[in-house]
Amino acid sequence: MTASALKTRVRAALQINMHPFDAPNVVHTLPHQLRAWAGQVDRVLVTVDTRLANAGRYRAERYEEAREALSALLEGMRGDHPALVVDPVSYDGETRAQIGRAFFRTTPDWPDRAFDGGPFYVYFHGLHRANADYVLHMDSDMLFGGGSRTWIDEAVALLERRPDALFVGPFPGPPRADGSLDPAVHAGFPGLSGVAAPVRLDEPAPAYRFSTVSTRIFMMDMRRFSARIGALDLPRPDLKRRLRARAFAETPRAMPAEEVLSVNLAARGLSRIDYLGAGAGMFSLHPPYRTPEFYARLPDLVAPCPAPTGSVPPRGAE
């Protein structure tokens, strides 16, 4: 499927961010993510960043070699997934103007990258280009368990009965036996203070309300964003971060995208809900390390679970 197909708005889309240097995990994680989610959405969009940071931890060598490797990998996967749309990020004036009208109408001086050179524009590019009422966004290295084939429909229903929620995400890690949340998954952001602890909600399946959102994984109600926020305020980084921006040869105008989204959530009295869903549900995992052992074991971690004798596994079961 070509990018021109994005002109038609759909109900739900899966949108995955990746960068050329993600190729070593994408070869394994993208098929895993498609098994888990492609059957629940109307569109699958892979957003590929096309720029390097000026300096700092987001800059690396051999970019062109990595870009060619990722391009070849994605082109090969399209043979098995013809509905997959690969969408390189465009920084041209008209595209940037469209993103600005969708997210930053009151802040015309918004940057391409956060103060530390981290991705910023690419997140909003992907959300906008997905052109869906509900966008399930994730980073390229996210892993999933539970195997629910109905999670998105359940999450949409949850948003409909929780008008204060703008985001809903899969449960953050496997739940405990009583459905409770491991406190270790609750962490604030360096640039935010006074972040409230998560609150368990009265729902049929385990669900917790958060006052922040991570750009690693979320499903966003795009119509609710337009109605309740419309244009994002862009809080300025503190002095320490502005000095770091200068050291990284980056603009000091923006905090990371997840902190910008979280500040705007709090200002409008909105929230994110992490939700397991019915049965085994769906939960997410984010690998914290990139060691040789991790890459060696990754194929086994994401391999489809074999079906019990005499049964047929649900599509996407992991």
Image (spheres, rainbow, N blue to C red):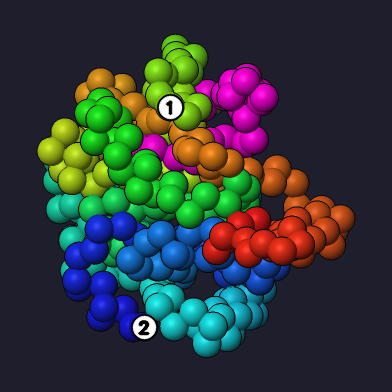
Label 2: which secondary element: loop
Q: Quadrant of the N terminus?
A: bottom left
Q: Nearer the viewer, residue 132 or 155?
A: 155
Residue 204 is tagged as 1
Residue 51 location in percent, x, y? 47, 66
Q: Which residue: 44% across, 83% down? A: 82
Residue 317 seen in the current view:
yes
Label 1: which secondary element: loop
Q: Which residue: 19% across, 39% down? A: 224
Examine the structure image and report whether residue 177 is included in the region drawn in magenta. yes
Q: Quadrant of the C terminus?
A: bottom right
Left or right of residue 39: residue 268? left
Q: Nearer the viewer, residue 91 or 189?
A: 189
Q: Identify the amino acid type marked 1.
A: Pro
Residue marked by disc 2: 1
Residue 47 location in percent, x, y? 43, 66
